[in-house]
């Protein structure tokens, strides 16, 4: 295997996953975001794509090169190889690449990879040290295993959507793919844990992750509120489900968000806004009382906030959890975002492109240098030559047979 012989002998100060090879059959968001994170950590990620269409998000590109925002967001630093998995030659090629990889990840519906001769049992029988990762909507087992599902559907089915939106309005989906994003983070964590386990005992594993599990787990305190008292939480709009004051508050110029639920934070807020009388008010004396009288508390707080601008109040509240409501462009150009390298400019052929940075920050380990997201089949020849040692004639034959692009 590519990485098993290198894992214990990595270059000093190399990225943590230097020497690990990932064969990535995933598309859209959850799988690709996971493998992008692995690439950031130093893994060699080989993205296997359909020769004609590639990753489905490529079709959303308006610039003609198959790399619109939806693709650019989740596919940097990977190598793209186009294999027709409907052909015997393509399937054989994929199995050979899997045998040279440490991790295989796919997010097809359960059963698809088995029909392609690339299922977990077959690949792990050939290489017991392989870590095989399946990401699906409802998991590899259970009554919904064969059902397709996407992030907003799981937001609805998990109960998450019932909590979002105006208090007097209907259920509202979160516009970002929060369940996909959380699933990607869970998958990255599980893969890293499996790699540690393999280093200890030598065996690989089968990791079964799904959007359903992630969505239910993400209910967190809202789910436990129901399990504790038997009452599903009600929609709370911009407020916290229970604690107060945690809400959007109006000022003289623009709304600001305050999260001051503890007695100490609430007292500090009251001092800033000149309302030291509020903590002594029986309606607001303690977290439970403030929760019961949150509407009245909001009126009291806003009476003070409406006397000054959002900018003035936020300057006064720099020591407290308070923030303005930014647009996307304002957020991406904010000084703290720039300082943390959360937007980076990277080379892309004869031009440069901007991409979102990574949340990974290390002191003694370095991260892999960002590379631009690949064009479809950009690295087919390179991967076949370097990973499988195929000659130009071998590759030409595969291309003539339609196995690769």
Image (tube, rainbow, N blue to C red):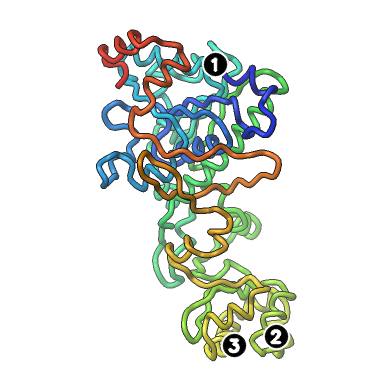
Q: Position of residue 164 (x, y in %)?
A: 46, 62
Give above or below for 67 relative to 12.
Answer: below
Left or right relative to 260: residue 79: left
Which picture quadrant has residue 84? top left
Which picture quadrant has residue 67? top left
Asked if the residue under mark 3 is in contact with the one under mark 1, i.e. CB atoms within 8 Å, the reply is: no
Element type where label 3 sits in the image:
helix
- Who's the residue at 30% across and 39% down the image? 66
> The C terminus is located in which quarter?
top left
Q: CA distance from mark 3 to mark 2?
A: 13 Å
Q: Position of residue 59 (x, y in %)?
A: 28, 40
Which residue is under mark 2?
271
Element type where label 1 sits in the image:
helix
- Crowding at mark 2 (Cα within 10 Å: few <14, some 14-19, many 20+): some
Task: Give the mark, 1 or 2, whose residue is nearer the N terminus.
Answer: 1
Q: CA distance from mark 1 to mark 2?
A: 63 Å
Which residue is under mark 3?
300
Discs 1/2, front: 2
Which residue is under mark 1?
124
Comparing 3 with 277, the one in front is 3
Task: Give the mark, 1 or 3, whose residue is nearer the N terminus.
Answer: 1
Discs 3/2, front: 2
Give above or below for 212 relative to 108.
Answer: below
- Who's the residue at 57% across and 68% down the image? 240
- Who's the residue at 53% across and 11% down the image? 126
Q: CA distance from mark 1 to mark 3?
A: 64 Å
Left or right relative to 264: residue 349: left
Comparing 282 with 202, the one in front is 202
Give above or below for 176 relative to 264.
Answer: above
> The N terminus is located in which quarter?
top right
């Amino acid at each position: 295997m590519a990485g098993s012989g290198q894992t214990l002998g990595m270059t000093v100060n190399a990225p943590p996953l230097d020497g690990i090879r990932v064969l990535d059959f995933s598309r859209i968001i959850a799988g690709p975001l996971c493998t992008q994170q692995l690439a950031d950590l130093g893994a060699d990620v080989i993205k296997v794509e359909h020769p004609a269409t590639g990753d489905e998000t490529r079709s959303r590109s308006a610039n003609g090169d198959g790399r619109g925002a939806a693709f650019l967001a989740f596919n940097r630093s990977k190598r793209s190889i186009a294999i027709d998995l409907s052909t015997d030659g393509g399937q054989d090629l994929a199995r050979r690449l899997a045998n040279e990889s440490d991790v295989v990840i796919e997010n097809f519906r359960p059963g698809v990879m088995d029909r392609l001769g690339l299922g977990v049992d077959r690949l792990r029988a050939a290489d017991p040290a392989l870590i095989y990762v399946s990401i699906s909507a409802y998991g590899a087992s259970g009554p919904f295993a064969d059902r397709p599902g996407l992030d907003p559907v799981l937001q609805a089915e998990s109960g998450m959507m019932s909590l979002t939106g105006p208090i007097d309005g209907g259920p509202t989906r979160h516009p970002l793919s929060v369940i996909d994003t959380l699933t990607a983070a869970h998958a990255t964590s599980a893969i890293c844990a499996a790699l540690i386990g393999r280093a200890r005992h030598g065996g690989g594993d089968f990791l079964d992750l799904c959007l359903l599990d992630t969505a239910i787990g993400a209910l967190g305190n809202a789910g436990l509120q129901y399990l504790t008292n038997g009452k599903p939480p009600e929609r709370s709009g911009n407020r916290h489900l229970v604690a107060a004051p945690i809400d959007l508050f109006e000022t003289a110029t623009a709304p600001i968000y305050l999260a001051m639920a503890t007695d100490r934070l609430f007292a500090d807020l009251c001092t800033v806004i000149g309302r030291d009388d509020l903590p002594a008010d029986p309606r607001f004396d303690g977290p439970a009382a403030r929760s019961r009288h949150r509407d009245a508390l909001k009126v009291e707080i806003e009476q003070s906030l409406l006397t000054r601008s959002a900018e003035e109040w936020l300057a006064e509240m720099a020591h407290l959890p308070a923030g303005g409501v930014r647009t996307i462009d304002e957020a991406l150009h904010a000084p703290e975002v720039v300082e943390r390298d959360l937007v980076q400019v990277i080379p892309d052929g004869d031009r440069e492109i901007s991409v979102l940075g990574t949340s990974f920050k290390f002191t003694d380990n370095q991260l892999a240098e960002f590379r631009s997201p690949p064009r479809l089949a950009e690295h087919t020849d390179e991967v076949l030559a370097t990973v499988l040692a195929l000659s130009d004639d071998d590759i030409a034959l595969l291309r003539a047979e339609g196995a690769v692009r």
